[in-house]
Image (cartoon, grey):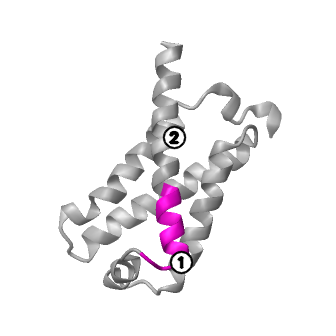
Amino acid sequence: MQKRNKIIYWITTIFLAVGMTAGGVQQTFQIGGYNEIVTGLGYPLYLLTILGIWKILGVIVLLVPRLPLLKEWAYAGFFFAMSGAFISHLAVGQSFAEAVPSLILLVVTVLSWYFRPNDRKVSIKQL
């Protein structure tokens, strides 16, 4: 059971890291079609740079050892960013298919968080 959880954790975490890094770089430099997506949702373009930088920093925090409290913040940030993106697509009347990439990253975020090993969790002693 423990080995299975570790495998699930690393598969979902690597998928999450790749997805967030790719999106973060594209958003930071405003390439890859993100300008059209964000303006279509009604958000200002400067939001892309902010989200992109935070995504890249969040990936770094998730992958380095220790820093469990920052890992919690990174997971929370990914959760809010992806749930916000999913809801934004639906709120402006776009098709469900347009919202699927953010939904996939949202699910992967939750799975990675849920299956993370104990040494990557915040304990009461650390607070």
Note whether 58 is above or below 38 in the view shown.
Answer: above
Q: Is residue 58 left or right of residue 6?
A: right
Q: Which residue is mark 1?
A: 29
Q: Is residue 25 magenta?
A: yes
Amino acid type of the residue that numbered disc 1 sits on in the rendered structure: Phe
Callout 2: helix, strand or loop?
A: helix
Q: Is residue 88 left or right of residue 108?
A: left
Horizontal and vertical percent for residue 63?
A: 64, 43
Front residue (pair 98, 25): 25
The part of the chain drawn in magenta is 20-31
Q: Main secondary structure of the magenta part?
A: helix
Note whether 45 is above or below 122 in the view shown.
Answer: below
Amino acid type of the residue that numbered disc 2 sits on in the rendered structure: Thr
Q: Is residue 122 magenta?
A: no
Horizontal and vertical percent for residue 107?
A: 38, 45
Note whether 113 is above or below 115 in the view shown.
Answer: below
Q: Which residue is mark 2?
A: 13
Horizontal and vertical percent for residue 3?
A: 51, 15
Front residue (pair 89, 29): 29
Which quarter of the figure is the C terminus placed in? top right
Q: Residues within 10 Å of mark 1 (few under 14, many from 20)?
A: few
Q: Residue at x 50, y 41 (%)?
A: 14
Residue depth check, mark 1 versus mark 2: number of the one nearer the observer: 1
Horizontal and vertical percent for residue 44?
A: 46, 87
Q: Residue at x 56, y 77 (%)?
A: 49
Callout 1: helix, strand or loop?
A: loop
CA gap between label 1 and label 2 equals 24 Å
Note whether 75 is above or below 126 in the view shown.
Answer: below
